[in-house]
Image (cartoon, rainbow, N blue to C red):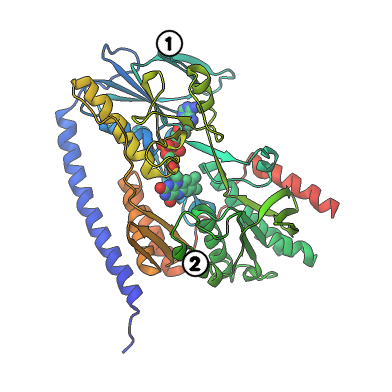
């Protein structure tokens, strides 16, 4: 009798359980939705016609959405402004970047998420300024065909700024065109285009050195994003693409992680870092710890480790190193006189408001909140969500005339990172474990955190399929202005060689 490996049994029984729970939840939510709709056939509040007080939330990410949801039963208008019409589940961007998932699998329309919340409206636009005295935000939005943005000033009684973070190239913004970071859907499709284009170009490259350059992928930064990207590219090369080409062997691909720290996942327990390094070695990923980047060129990266300078020839460099606040942070600081840190994050009070303006709050990746430990809280989804809840409750209590806790406290529920298929590390309180069990936990947490039910099921099915077949079906090279620019840069590099 053939014995089925325990991992397969665990995976499928877990899968079965999740699908059954999801089905039950779906039928319950459909019934509840119909009942709710029948009871609430009322006009949605609009941007301008209400006499109620108004909370403006800038950003429909993890923090902003939580704040909006907490305010759902409160007698107040909630206006959520975002420059995108969707909420993005950033932790799975690396899967889009490596063809495992499609962009729509990890994004959910903000209007859809808030459609049953009668006191909430959504505005698609970019907040470019705040007037704290007049209590207004300046919003730019462009209608189709409009050259100049439409400008509107919207009044708030309370303002929650949850506009998130962007890449930081540590003062070398010129590297951005050559080494894209991973923060938006566009970044993910850009990286996907570059990775798959490199294999395509290598297939028809006759020069051995250039072919090897094309098959070298350098990832700057050994945090969770860098590790997850490297693991996924290694799996692509060693498994998914292994029979797809005729002139190259994708398994020859070289994948390197460069990091200034002495170990990858330096925010995790040291034992887990070591386990992650073992998993990366098994996938054939090279690690260059204690190494910093000194220059990035279209055909190479220059590195420094102590006094030793080295160079790796490559056509694909991916940036997973620095994160900085979005520009709105500095604009808010200029308007209010509040301080920002070196990364542009706004320094907040223990209750997450800014100094001198008790009705303006900054939360999530944009906030430097350091009263709890003396150091800023990490830029992770849990911090943003808990802060969103805290501020939502604080405003609710003010409206109801109740008192609130005076100071936000972050409850760390732990950290997870995955290293390719069936391997992950979990740092959950006193429990530190790795391997298949950690990967199952990673899978469950990510599935349950994705914003819309439909996406949960789609992602789960896609993963189950990928798991069984090693396939990654979203391996599309789509055109993007950045990709065109990068192709032009690469062509110049080819001429020079
Ligand atoms: C690749 C990647 C992987 C990650 N993995 C993990 C993980 O595994 N676990 C984890 O906990 N965290 C992870 N994070 C971090 C996590 O995603 C962030 O901490 C979290 O998204 C922060 O939430 P936020 O609400 O502050 O900002 P965001 O979720 O970034 O939302 C900000 C929103 O504001 C909008 N916005 C920005 N500027 C403006 C403006 N001027 N006007 C209008 N709208 C604006 C944006 O469009 C966006 O919708 C990851 C991040 C990345 C990039």
Q: Which mark is residue 39?
A: none
Q: Quadrant of ligand 1?
A: top left
Q: Residue furthest bottom?
A: 1
Q: Is residue 464 above or below residue 147?
A: below
Q: Is residue 335 above or below residue 10?
A: above
Residue 438 seen in the current view = yes
SS of the residue under disc 1 = loop
Q: Where residue 467 appears, x then y in whole percent?
A: 42, 66
- Pointer 1: residues within 10 angstroms few (<14), some, or many (20+)? few
SS of the residue under disc 2 = helix
Labels in figure, total: 2
Q: Is residue 167 left or right of residue 294?
A: left
Q: Which residue is mark 1?
A: 133
Q: Residue furthest front?
A: 374
Q: Which residue is mark 2?
A: 274
Could you tell me which quadrant the N terminus lies in? bottom left
Relative depth, front residue between 261 and 83: 261
* First in residue order: circle 1 vs circle 2: 1
Tell me the quarter of the picture where residue 120 sits.
top left
Q: CA distance from mark 1 to mark 2?
A: 52 Å
Residue 457 seen in the current view = no
- Pointer 2: residues within 10 angstroms few (<14), some, or many (20+)? some
Q: Where residue 155 appears, x then y in whole percent?
A: 38, 14
Task: Identify the residue at horizontal 30%, vertical 47% (top origin).
Answer: 453
Q: Is residue 185 above or below residue 204?
A: above
Q: Is residue 338 left or right of residue 43?
A: right
Task: Identify the residue at horizontal 28%, vertical 15% (top origin).
Answer: 53
Q: Where residue 91 appears, x then y in whole percent?
A: 44, 49
């Amino acid at each position: 009798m053939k014995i089925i490996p325990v991992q397969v049994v665990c995976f499928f029984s877990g899968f079965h359980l999740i699908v059954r729970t999801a089905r039950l939840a779906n039928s319950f939510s459909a019934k509840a939705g119909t009942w709710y709709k029948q009871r609430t056939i009322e006009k949605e509040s609009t941007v301008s016609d209400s006499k109620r007080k108004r909370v403006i939330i800038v950003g429909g990410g993890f923090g902003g959405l939580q704040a909006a949801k907490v305010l759902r039963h409160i007698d107040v208008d909630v206006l959520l402004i975002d420059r995108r019409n969707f909420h993005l589940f950033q932790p799975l961007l690396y899967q889009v970047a490596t063809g495992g998932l499609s962009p729509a699998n990890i994004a959910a329309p903000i209007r859809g998420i808030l459609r049953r919340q009668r006191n909430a409206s959504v505005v698609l636009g970019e907040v470019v300024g705040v007037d704290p005295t007049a209590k207004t935000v300046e919003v730019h939005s462009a209608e189709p065909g409009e050259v100049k943005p439409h400008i509107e000033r919207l009044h708030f009684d309370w303002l929650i700024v949850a506009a998130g973070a962007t890449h930081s190239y540590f003062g070398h913004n010129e590297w951005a065109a050559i080494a894209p970071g991973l923060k938006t859907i566009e970044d993910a499709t850009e990286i996907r285009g570059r990775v798959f284009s490199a294999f395509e170009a290598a297939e028809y490259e006759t020069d051995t050195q250039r072919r090897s350059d094309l098959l070298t992928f350098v990832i700057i930064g050994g945090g969770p994003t860098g590790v997850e990207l490297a693991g996924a590219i290694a799996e692509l090369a060693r498994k998914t693409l292994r029979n797809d080409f005729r002139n190259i062997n994708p398994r020859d691909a070289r994948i390197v992680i460069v990091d200034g720290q002495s170990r990858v996942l330096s925010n995790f327990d040291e034992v887990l870092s070591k386990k992650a390094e073992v998993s990366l070695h098994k996938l054939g990923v090279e690690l260059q710890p204690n190494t910093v980047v000194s220059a990035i060129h279209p055909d190479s990266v220059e590195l420094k480790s102590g006094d030793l300078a080295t160079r790796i020839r490559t056509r694909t460099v991916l940036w997973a190193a620095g994160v900085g606040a979005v520009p709105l942070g500095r604009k808010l600081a200029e308007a209010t006189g509040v301080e920002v840190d070196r990364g542009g994050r706004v320094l907040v009070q223990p209750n997450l408001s800014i100094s001198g303006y008790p009705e303006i709050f900054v939360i999530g990746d944009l906030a430097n909140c350091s009263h709890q430990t003396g150091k800023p809280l990490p830029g992770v989804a849990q911090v943003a969500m808990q802060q969103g809840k805290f501020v939502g409750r604080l405003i609710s209590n003010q409206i109801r005339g109740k008192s609130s806790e005076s100071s936000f406290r972050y409850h760390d529920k732990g950290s997870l990172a995955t290293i390719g298929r069936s391997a992950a590390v979990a740092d959950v309180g006193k429990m530190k474990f790795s391997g298949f069990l950690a990967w199952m936990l990673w899978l469950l947490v990510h599935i349950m955190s994705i914003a819309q039910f439909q996406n949960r099921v789609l992602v789960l099915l896609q993963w189950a399929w990928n798991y069984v077949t090693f396939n990654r079906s979203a391996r599309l090279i789509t055109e993007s202005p950045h990709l065109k620019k990068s192709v032009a840069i690469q062509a110049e590099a080819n001429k020079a060689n």
